[in-house]
């Protein structure tokens, strides 16, 4: 059994990591870490606010085998106590903590701190796992025994999954996207109040659009001579927050190099990812993409849990009539599962078996 530590265990993504790792066949959570405020408390006690109210955000119960684990100070945490670390802290602390851990121990992160480093891949299951070999360059460059492997921004997780079969079959020139992002994407602190979101849409999310415009080029780029050559297409993004608990919806318009009919796009999307799914990773769904014909779908409340929250749902496939050749569609991904916690677990599974060559 692979010993796992969760850093940032008390936040929304940390909680989802614990749920996703409960009874995992390969990984066992043996250490928890968070801020100094939570250190020295049991996990259950660390989840309580000043009034004693429990801040547990998952519909599933707290896993029994971690409820009484002692939470350690992330700054003082000894990474050699575990085999693999999942980091669910914000970008600021991640920039300091993750290199400390990676000196000795592999780190899979949901933070943006290392996404844009030249020697760091942004891995998405079934999309670009060949980029994992770049982690060897990272280790050589930095003298680390471990590594830092970040997940992408949760906004574009479903988008890049849906774009990959289009790029492979038809080529892509330009992407225009508008996101309708769930409230859980804002995190627990500072989060969003009911008064902010009731009967409301917030048309701007600070720092989100540059990430949505730059990360797809890196994720969908080619690995050549130990470096990623960015994909040759541009993305224009508008990112909004809507009163939905979980599930990021993206309306995408894609200009393609070749003619791409809705029927042809549906076919390549439906067939996409079979080889990756066949690897049998515990967190992988049966299908990376499911295409729905109902014009009123996908909807977050109805479709976000497809494949245990790991399947991207695509609907409203239509010809693009303004840009020339192309396709437009709506895609939905569970932002705290595929886009964060379970996506990170899936990456950890892949790296453990196929990069670190651990016996699982």
Image (tube, rainbow, N blue to C red):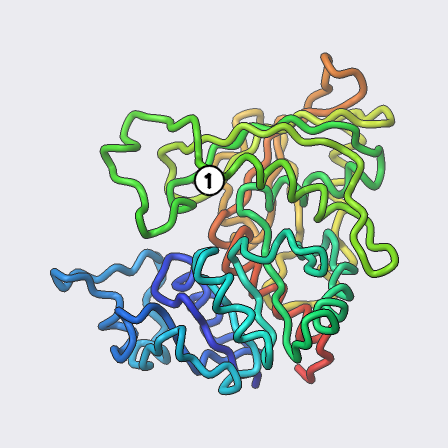
Q: In this view, does 344 lie to the left or right of 122?
A: left
User: Given the current orientation, which residue lies at the most extreme left position?
Assistant: 51
**Which quadrant holds residue 258?**
top right
* Residue at the image point whose x is 29% and y is 81% from the top: 68
The answer to which of 333 and 268 lies nearer the viewer is 333
Query: Is residue 193 depicted above or below 317 in this figure?
Result: below
Residue 247 position in % (x across, y down): 47, 42
Residue 39 position in % (x across, y down): 29, 76
* Residue at the image point whose x is 57% and y is 82% from the top: 83
The answer to which of 59 and 248 lies nearer the viewer is 248
Residue 158 position in % (x across, y down): 60, 43
Query: Is residue 142 depicted above or below 123 in this figure?
Result: below
* Residue at the image point whose x is 65% and y is 37% from the top: 291
- Can residue 354 be seen here? no
User: Given the current orientation, which residue lies at the most extreme top position?
Assistant: 322
Number of marks: 1
**Residue at image mark 1:** 302
Q: In this view, does 269 lie to the left or right of 10?
A: right
Image quadrant for the N terminus? bottom right
Image quadrant for the C terminus? bottom right
* Residue at the image point whose x is 73% and y is 51% from the top: 127
Q: Is residue 195 left or right of residue 100?
A: left
Residue 249 position in % (x across, y down): 52, 35
- Can residue 63 be seen here? yes
Say few, some or many: other residues with alpha carbon within 10 Å of mark 1 (under 14 / 14 to 19 / 20 or more): few
Assign a secondary structure to mark 1. helix
Query: Is residue 318 depicted above or below 355 in this figure?
Result: above
**Which quadrant holds residue 231?**
top right
């Amino acid at each position: 059994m692979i010993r796992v530590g969760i850093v940032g265990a008390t936040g929304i993504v940390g909680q989802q990591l614990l749920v996703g790792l409960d009874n995992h066949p390969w990984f066992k959570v043996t250490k928890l870490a968070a801020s100094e405020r939570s250190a020295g408390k049991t996990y259950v006690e660390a989840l309580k606010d000043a009034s004693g109210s429990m801040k547990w955000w998952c519909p599933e119960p707290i896993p029994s085998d971690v409820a009484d684990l002692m939470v350690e100070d992330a700054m003082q945490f000894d990474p050699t106590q575990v085999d693999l670390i999942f980091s669910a802290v914000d970008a600021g602390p991640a920039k300091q903590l993750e290199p400390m851990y990676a000196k000795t121990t592999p780190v899979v992160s949901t933070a943006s701190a290392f996404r844009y480093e030249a020697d760091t891949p942004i891995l998405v299951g079934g999309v670009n796992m060949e980029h994992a070999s770049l982690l060897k360059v990272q280790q050589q460059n930095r003298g680390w025994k471990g590594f830092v492997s970040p997940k992408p921004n949760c906004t574009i997780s479903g988008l890049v999954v849906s774009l990959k079969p289009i790029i492979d079959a038809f080529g892509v020139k330009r992407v225009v996207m508008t996101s309708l992002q769930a409230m859980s994407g804002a995190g627990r602190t500072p989060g969003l109040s009911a008064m902010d979101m009731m009967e409301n849409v917030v048309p701007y999310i600070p720092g989100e659009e540059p990430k949505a415009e730059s990360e797809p080029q890196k994720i969908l780029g080619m690995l050549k001579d130990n470096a990623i050559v960015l994909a040759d297409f541009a993305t224009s993004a508008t990112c909004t927050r809507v009163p939905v608990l979980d599930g990021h919806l993206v309306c995408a318009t894609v200009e393609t190099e070749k003619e791409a009919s809705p029927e042809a796009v549906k076919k390549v999307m439906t067939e996409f990812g079979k080889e990756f799914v066949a690897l049998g990773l515990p967190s992988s769904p049966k299908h990376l993409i499911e295409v729905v014909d109902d014009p009123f779908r996908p909807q977050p409340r109805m479709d976000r849990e497809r494949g245990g929250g790991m399947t991207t749902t695509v609907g409203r496939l239509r010809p693009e009539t303004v840009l020339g050749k192309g396709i437009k569609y709506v895609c939905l991904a569970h932002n705290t599962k595929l886009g964060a916690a379970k996506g990170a677990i899936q990456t950890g599974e892949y790296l453990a078996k196929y990069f670190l060559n651990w016996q699982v």
